[in-house]
Image (spheres, rainbow, N blue to C red):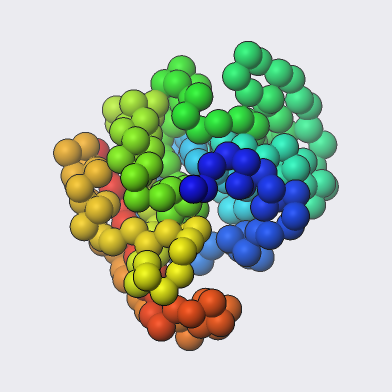
Amino acid sequence: MVDNQHWLDRWKENRIGFHEPTVNQHLRQYLPQFSLPRGACVFLPLCGKAHDIVWIAQQGYEVIGIELSQLAIEAFFEGNRLDYERFDTDRFGIYRSGNISLLQGDFFDLSNDDLGACSLVYDRAALIAMEQQHRPGYCDHMLSIIPAASNMLLITLEYDQAEMQGPPFSVPSDEVYQYYSDAFSINLLESNDIIDERPRWRKVGLSALSESVFRLDR
């Protein structure tokens, strides 16, 4: 079972193969298509120390991220040479620097009050971090905390789950429609076999790996 301690241990032991060394190419390509006004808020669930955070902020948007690991958040600010202030609430440690706010704590402790101003969810690594039995609860909670008008840019992976345990876990496209079609109009922007671009996945036993990018509009 992949629980909170699993992720804390991975950050402590620096087993963070899920961390991308550059800004995600799909984020660069598709974020402008949402035509968000300057100052709009973008929410990143399970954000880690992603380079995407700074890039989104540099486009003139407010960023709110949620991350379980204090090590990850502090590594983000240190790696980007950003000064920050930290204060604690009853649920989160909150780190702020300019238009970036990172909440250290459990995603499932978020409420609508925390994200009431967000216009877009950017989910690159959260849904695929959930085991299948936890994904319906994750999506239900997501829908309960984001504003009714917010949209989503979602990236998933799909592979033969028998070939690798995960995380990241395989999320078939039909699951995305199952979880979100009642709330969003779902558009599959692209789906590509990326196994040749990610040789480390062959080393762990995968024969194929598909990456899909979805745009979800209210």
Q: Position of 200 compared to 130: left or right?
A: right
Give the quarter of the image for residue 71.
top right
Identity of the residue drawn at 63% across and 23% down: 92
Task: Give the vertical position of 49 relative to 165 (above or below).
Answer: above
- Residue at far bottom of view: 196
Compared to 109, does 6 lie above or below?
Answer: below
| Residue 10 percent coordinates (x, y) | 67, 52
Q: Residue furthest left?
A: 182
Residue 155 lies in quadrant: bottom left
Q: Which corner quadrant of the image does residue 209 belong to?
A: bottom left
Q: Is residue 197 visible?
A: no
| Residue furthest to the top | 90
Residue 55 placement (x, y as % from top left):
61, 52
Total label count?
0
Can residue 113 be seen? Answer: yes
Q: Residue at x 47, y 29 (%)?
A: 108
Q: Is residue 63 left or right of residue 128?
A: right
Tell me which residue sits at (46%, 64%) in the image: 165
* Nearer-the-camera pick, 148 or 107: 107
Residue 192 coordinates in the image, percent (x, y): 35, 76
Q: Nearer the viewer, residue 161 or 124?
A: 161
Q: Give the left or right position of residue 129, taking residue 62 as reference.
A: left
Across and down, in percent, residue 30 comes to 41, 59
**Quadrant in which the C terminus appears:** top left
Q: Is residue 202 above or below residue 49?
A: below
